[in-house]
Image (cartoon, coloured by chain):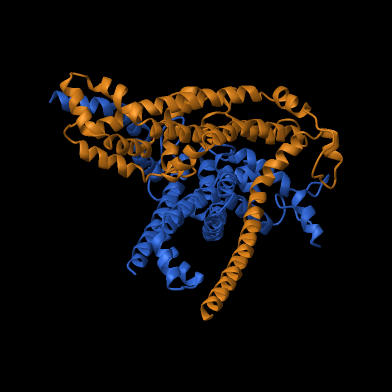
Chain colours: A orange, B blue
Amino acid sequence: MPDTKTRFTNEQILRKTSRRRTITHVVIYVLLAVWGIMVLFPFYWMLLTSIKGYGAYSSEYIPKFFTLSPTLENYAEAFTAVPLAKYFLNTLIFTVFTTLLMMIVIILAAFAFARLEFRGKNVVFALFLSLMMIPNELVIITNYVTITDLDMRNTFLGLILPSVTSVFYIYLLKENFEAIPNELYKAAKVDGTSDLKYLLRVMIPISRPTIVTIVILKVIECWNSYVWPRLVTDDPDYYLVSNGIQEIRENGFGRENIPAMMAAVVVISVPLIVIFLVFRKKIMEGVSRGGTKG
Amino acid sequence: MRNSFKGWLYLLPAIVFLGVFMVYPLIDVVVYSFEENYNFASQTYTGTGLFNYSYVLHDPYFAQALKNTFILVIITVPLSTGLALLVSLGLSKIPKLCGLFQTVYFLPYVTNTLAVGLVFMILFKKTPYSDGMINLLIKLFGGEAVDFIGGPYWAKMLVMCFYTVWIVLPFKILILTSALASVNENYYKAARVDGTRPTRIFFKITLPMIAPMIFYLVITGFIGAFKAYSDEVALFGTDLNAAGMNTIVGYIYDMLYGNSGGYPSYASAAAIILFVIVFTITCINLSASKRSRLF
């Protein structure tokens, strides 16, 4: 008899704790949802504003949270009144070439550090690592002077070249290359495969996940870069989207056409959001391995 | 010998890029900062000395930028780290929808700061035509409408801090979520067998286990917040001095370029002052984290 009694109270306790757990869960879900709304709301607002008509938007003293007459005219306006397509193309060119050039440079360097033996290797590697601590703000001044002196302002070369350097990715890739068993390299050497062929045929395919991660992170960085492009371009023909947005804000559309501005903002934000949703896992994994925003 | 040559050949592109765009500028910026009245066009200067530093340190705009940056750092670093900890603790406690929440929370990381800053500006701005979204909410709760973009200093600072937290939180949540997930489950099981209270579990197991990651976030958070610039441009426009919301980095770029620009010497001096501040604070942070890890 006492046995069943204890079991009964045990069940009661279990039920009680499980009820308390349900309440805690509900509270947590609500709080998390509140922050979720705060994250999503600006995105909702920009989409909403971008489909409101200019007249409708201007007459709303109290902003409305929805619209019954959506329109796409702001998008047409965004592409015709300012050279948004041009900004887009510029950013695309900048992003593709910067990323491509950087990949070539860092793959070669990482390979040298990971597999080749040569005198002074460790010293150079230590020097490279110490460069990781140098903030961009410190070197950007001279780079600005260099590019100006070389007459490369308002050119793609001037935009791209100083953006190529990245010590951190060399380090990341070198670690990855080193994880590939050395036996493979020795076997390839015995077979008479050249270093370059080995790099292209074996190392790059094996390290593809890391390489893809680096590419995505660099693409995000390029797409959002603002400071350097602002310094070296003052000709709208070479503006990137960030500078374009700033230009639109200060001079384009007339200051009050906010729906058209928001349409431009949507157009600029969509590519990265799509990339993010497609490569969600890879991006989050890559960022937690060593990306910082900046 | 042939091999040695080959190694250097593979390294050559990296060395050229880093040499031209990092090592040389690093030396050069120090040189600039001591050259007085350096002129871009003629590449001449009138003397060497500490005048540039003294000019920057006595410039009221620099004082303003320094003040803004320090307020921003002191508010946003603890706030964002604490919030990120709360959010990731919440995420670790719920069984469902965790992935969805994580995806949503990460969105600000991949968006263009300038573009979304424009949305924030519109949400907070008060114009003659409309009080704006946020003021609508404030009035709903019986408050008075404030222009957060062109109004009083504290209001502008509030938006700046809020936007900064909004931008930096994704990274911190991501790091802390994976740190929490990597705590060995056996510790929790043992604690549960012992009947340990949840708060005690948090302070005696969870916090010590994720402490290194928290320190990492605080250190990178300090560095990042000291370099704040684009977020401010997004909210208040390119003329940050006029808005009274300039930051140290903003001051450097304004000295270099734009309407008030053309002074690379002042910019260099300011950049070196910034570097010294960040370096000092990072050292303090590192030694603090080392000391607390002894326990």
Name the side, left or right, on which B266 lies relative to A78: left
Question: Which image quarter is the C terminus of chain B in?
Answer: bottom left
In depth, the one of A267 and A247 nearer the eye is A267
Quadrant of the image occupied by residue A212: top left
Q: Is residue B160 above or below residue A263?
A: below
Q: Is residue A270 above or below residue B120?
A: above
Residue B41 horizontal/vertical position (percent): 46, 30
Residue A2 horizontal/vertical position (percent): 52, 81
Question: Which residue lies most toward the left here?
Answer: B1
Q: Residue at x 23, y 32 (%)?
A: A115
Q: How many numbered marks appear?
A: 0
Quadrant of the image occupied by residue A150: top left
Q: Is residue A46 above or below residue B226?
A: above
Q: Residue at x 72, y 47 (%)?
A: B123
Q: Residue at x 68, y 44 (%)?
A: A42
In depth, the one of A166 and B71 nearer the eye is A166
Residue B31 visible to an observer of this rendering: yes
Residue B37 visible to an observer of this rendering: no
Residue A287 horizontal/vertical position (percent): 46, 42
Question: Which residue lies most toward the front here?
Answer: A1
Question: Which image quarter is the N terminus of chain B in?
Answer: top left
Residue A77 horizontal/vertical position (percent): 75, 26
Question: Which residue lies most toward the bottom here?
Answer: A2
Q: Is residue B86 above or below residue A163?
A: below
Q: Residue at x 47, y 37 (%)?
A: A282
In depth, the one of A32 and B154 nearer the eye is A32
